[in-house]
């Protein structure tokens, strides 16, 4: 009678690792590797964020923003409401979309060409970093207000949750690069990493940056550590 012998453990481990490696399941260090995350890149057109107090001035006391559509991040929405943004030379951009919900600060985010059109010299800033930035005039259906500061070019950035940060080996406020394969292939450098448990992986660039790399016809985007 033949006696079954237990297979050599080292041989079994090599066989399993070989199978998983062919399927992308194990890294070179022997750890199980998760598939590469799906990178979503959205174009952030000109928009503004408002405090409830400023909404009251522009739309009437107690007015509440109404949602036109939800954005990729579940916490945010594009509102039906818009305002006109007026620069120091009385140049105006009408119909600038408000994003909700209301925040603790008011801020207008423009692309470089928007700022040139309005005659405002805007700095590149992280959202919320508005100290020392220029202001503008906002006009709504019920009133207007002179915003003392808060007009910026939003720094290109990437939202992600903790698991995506672990995959890329980055932390909050680190930097990443994004390679864009398109008819106008480009490398966008120094995207600011923003990590929050509620966020999904999403890159935000403005309309000028998207046009520069022909993002709408891109076939592939890839994030790498800076």
Image (spheres, rainbow, N blue to C red):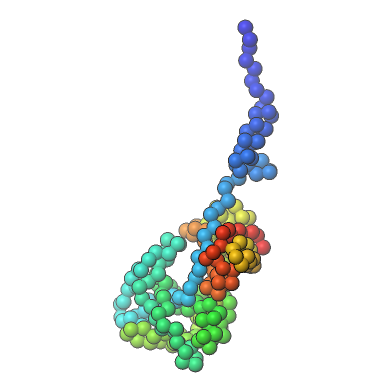
List the single residue furthest toward the bottom. Answer: 89
Q: Quadrant of the N terminus?
A: top right
The answer to whether one can see residue 214 in this image is yes
- Image side of residue 138 versus residue 152, left or right: left
In the rendered structure, the answer to whether residue 74 lies left or right of residue 163 reads left
Q: Residue at x 54, y 57 (%)?
A: 39
Say which quarter of the image contains residue 214. Answer: bottom right
Q: Is residue 100 above or below residue 86?
A: above
Q: On the image, which quarter does residue 141 sit in?
A: bottom left
The one nearer the camera, 117 or 189, is: 117
Looking at the picture, does residue 162 appear above or below residue 5? below
Question: Where residue 226 sits: x, y (%)?
Answer: 67, 63
Q: How many numbered dots are placed on residues in this image?
A: 0
Task: Please tell me in which quadrant of the rendered image residue 72 appears.
Answer: bottom left
Q: Identify the residue at the far top of this view.
A: 1
Q: Which residue is depicted at the point 31% across and 76% down? A: 63
Above/below status of 125 relative to 161: below
The spot of residue 82 in percent (x, y) is 38, 78
| Residue drawn at 64 percent across, 20 percent down | 6
Give how far across and how far down residue 58 sits, in percent. 36, 83
Q: Is residue 60 above or below residue 2?
A: below
Residue drawn at x 47%, y 86% is: 136
Nearest to the observer: residue 20 or residue 138: 20
Taking the image as drawn, is residue 191 in sight? no
Q: Nearer the viewer, residue 8 or 41?
A: 41
Image coords of residue 94 (percent x, y): 41, 83
């Amino acid at each position: 009678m033949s006696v079954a012998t237990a297979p050599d453990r080292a041989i079994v481990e090599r066989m399993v690792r070989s199978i998983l490696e062919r399927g992308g399941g194990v890294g070179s260090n022997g750890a199980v590797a998760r598939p590469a995350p799906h990178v979503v890149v959205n174009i952030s057109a000109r928009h503004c964020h408002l405090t409830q107090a400023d909404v009251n001035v522009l739309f009437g006391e107690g007015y509440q923003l109404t949602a036109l559509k939800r954005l990729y991040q579940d916490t945010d929405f594009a509102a039906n409401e818009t305002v006109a943004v007026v620069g120091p030379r009385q140049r105006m951009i009408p119909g600038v979309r408000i994003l909700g919900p209301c925040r603790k600060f008011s801020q207008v985010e423009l692309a470089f060409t928007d700022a040139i059109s309005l005659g405002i010299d805007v700095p590149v800033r992280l959202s919320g970093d508005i100290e020392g930035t220029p202001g503008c005039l906002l006009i709504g259906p019920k009133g207007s207000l002179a915003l003392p500061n808060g007009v910026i070019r939003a720094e290109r950035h990437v939202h992600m949750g903790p698991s995506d940060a672990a995959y890329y080996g980055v932390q909050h406020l680190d930097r990443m690069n994004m390679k864009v394969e398109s008819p106008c292939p480009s490398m966008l450098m120094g995207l600011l990493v923003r990590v929050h448990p509620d966020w999904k992986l999403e890159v935000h660039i403005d309309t000028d940056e998207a046009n520069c790399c022909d993002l709408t016809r891109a076939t592939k985007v890839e994030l790498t550590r800076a």
